[in-house]
Image (cartoon, rainbow, N blue to C red):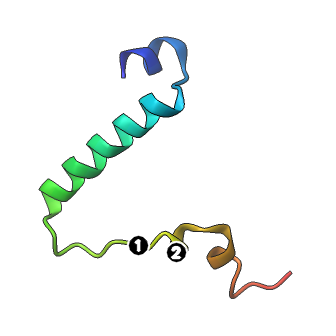
Amino acid sequence: MAKLQTQGQLNNEEFELIADKLADEFAAYFGSTFPVLSDYAMTRESIYEDHPL
């Protein structure tokens, strides 16, 4: 996080480490009963599924 605060950017590996840690902390706080979105739900395809161009 210090690098992000000073340089404003992270490489992919650093981002993944922080994202994994945040996900673990979120799961620990809310428990395993909190619904999880599928990978499909987070894709551009699913976002625009009900909104044709």
Q: Residue furthest front?
A: 13
Q: In which quarter of the image is the C terminus?
A: bottom right
Q: Residues within 10 Å of mark 1 (few under 14, many from 20)?
A: few
- Taking 21 as reference, is 44 above or below it? below
Q: Is residue 51 left or right of residue 43?
A: right
Q: In which quarter of the image is residue 22?
A: top left
Residue 32 on image: x %, y %: 16, 69
Q: Residue at x 51, y 25 (%)?
A: 10
Provide the secondary structure element on which disc 1 rests: loop
In contact (CB < 8 Å): disc 2 and disc 1: yes
Q: Quadrant of the N terminus?
A: top left
Q: Residue at x 35, y 35 (%)?
A: 17
Q: Which mark is residue 37?
A: 1
Residue 16 on image: x %, y %: 42, 39
Q: Which mark is residue 41?
A: 2
Q: Which residue is drawn at 71% across and 78% down?
A: 48
Badge 2 amino acid: Ala
C-alpha distance separating marks 2 and 1: 6 Å
- Taking 51 as reference, is 37 above or below it? above
Q: Residue furthest top?
A: 6
Residue 38 on image: x %, y %: 44, 74
Q: In which quarter of the image is residue 8?
A: top right
- Taking 49 as reference, is 11 above or below it? above
Q: In this view, does 29 lie to the left or right of 47?
A: left
Residue 20 on image: x %, y %: 32, 45
Provide the secondary structure element on which disc 2 rests: helix
Q: Residue furthest right?
A: 53
Badge 1 amino acid: Leu
